[in-house]
């Protein structure tokens, strides 16, 4: 006779779980996403450690201050670029905008030695170009901001060359020279400007309704419209702020060089886009943190400074930055793929 008594199975140990293939897959996918999220910071730390070993000059107080001073302009302008990219846009005019603003500041200095008026002239110039970008993009119903910002890149550069007669215009108020070129206890004053802009950006993006609107517009524009979010106003405001950041960058660069020049800002648009993407933001919009732009800007500054210390040719430096941009874009693609896989696995677990 066959016994019907159930076969005894020892109880599972306390806290143990039956292995689940889907849970394990979701776990490793989540780990991969987290590593991609902190990847730029880890890479920056590894760069600093490696370069400190390779060059004894790299981690000296003087060289660190030099990196911070050179990175300040890219960092400030990149924060404005970051807001534009959050809305799935791009601002190619920031370099020419900065050059035009510096020339406008130099012209203003010829009429008045007031630092307040000169700074105001540069900020208004930058914001005006940003406003043109936003207004034409929105009300001109352009398919992409690439078109108008490429146009204003050329227009602003031409205006700067015409106003300055193709040459640098020396002279800036003492306060601007201090702000852009001097330091206190080895810390450049421009770093405090970067920190101030960062705090303002964080307040606007994280504590104000306007900040949530930006993420909504970049994440799902159609849904944002249905929710009643003023899409046009949000888009225009991001380009105005991007232009304003270019004006702030002009103040710092003009102060560091004691001049305004139509040749300022060459390839700055590429540096700022690279800083945002290298830092971990996405071209798909709606995802990113202002810290991403700062990390990316510092990384670009560190790479260029290290290549200079190692006597690497300037042309090769451009190649290195280009390769880093490609790797950053690929990491963004990988992040999107992993996020899709995580959502698929989570949906399968719920079934």
Image: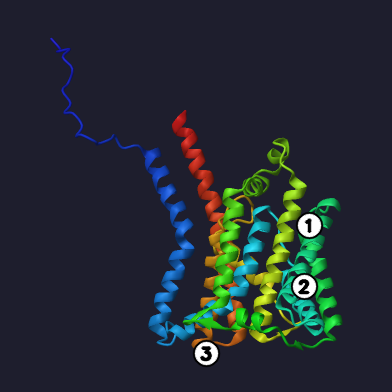
Residue topped by disc 2: 121
Say the numbered circle drawn on residue 325.
none
- Across and down, in percent, residue 126 comes to 75, 68
Q: Secondary structure at mark 3?
A: loop
Give the side of residue 129 with respect to residue 61, left or right: right
Instruction: Give the residue at the far left of this rendering.
Output: 1
- Across and down, in percent, residue 324 comes to 56, 70
Q: Residue at x 71, y 84 (%)?
A: 172
Instruction: Give the residue at the far top of this rendering.
Output: 1
On screen, 12 above or below 239?
Answer: above
Q: Secondary structure at mark 2?
A: helix
State which mark lies toward you, 3 or 1. 1
Q: Which of these two is toward me, 340 or 291? A: 291
- Across and down, in percent, residue 297 comes to 56, 70
Residue topped by disc 1: 134
Residue topped by disc 3: 311
The mark nearer the N terminus, 3 or 1, is 1
């Amino acid at each position: 006779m066959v016994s019907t008594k159930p076969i005894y199975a020892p109880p599972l140990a306390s806290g143990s779980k039956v292995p689940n293939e889907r849970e394990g897959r979701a776990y490793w996918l989540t780990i991969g996403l987290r590593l991609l999220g902190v990847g730029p910071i880890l890479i920056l730390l590894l760069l600093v450690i490696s370069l400190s070993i390779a060059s004894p000059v790299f981690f000296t107080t003087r060289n660190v201050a030099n990196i911070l001073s050179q990175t300040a302009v890219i960092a400030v302008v990149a924060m404005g670029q970051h807001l534009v990219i959050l809305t799935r846009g791009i601002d190619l005019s920031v370099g020419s905008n900065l050059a035009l603003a510096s020339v406008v500041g130099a012209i203003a200095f010829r009429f008045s030695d007031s630092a307040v008026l000169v700074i105001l002239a540069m900020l208004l110039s930058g914001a005006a170009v940003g406003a043109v970008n936003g207004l034409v993009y929105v009300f001109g119903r352009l398919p992409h901001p690439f078109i108008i910002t490429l146009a204003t890149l050329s227009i602003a550069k031409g205006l700067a060359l015409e106003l300055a007669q193709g040459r640098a215009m020396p002279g800036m108020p003492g306060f601007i020279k201090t702000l852009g070129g001097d330091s206190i206890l080895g810390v450049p004053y421009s770093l405090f400007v970067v920190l101030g802009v960062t705090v303002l950006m964080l307040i606007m993006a994280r504590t104000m309704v306007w900040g949530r609107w930006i993420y909504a517009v970049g994440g799902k524009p159609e849904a944002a419209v249905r929710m009643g979010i003023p899409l046009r106003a949000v888009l225009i405001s991001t380009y105005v702020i991007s232009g304003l950041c270019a004006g702030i960058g002009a103040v710092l660069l003009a102060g560091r060089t004691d001049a305004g020049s139509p040749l300022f800002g060459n390839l700055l648009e590429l540096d700022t886009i690279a800083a945002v993407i290298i830092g971990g933001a996405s071209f798909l919009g709606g995802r990113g943190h202002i810290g991403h732009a700062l990390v990316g800007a510092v990384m670009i500054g560190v790479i260029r400074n290290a290549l200079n210390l190692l006597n690497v040719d300037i042309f090769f430096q451009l190649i290195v930055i280009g390769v880093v941009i490609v790797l950053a874009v690929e990491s963004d693609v990988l992040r999107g793929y992993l996020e899709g896989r995580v959502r698929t696995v989570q949906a399968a677990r719920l079934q």
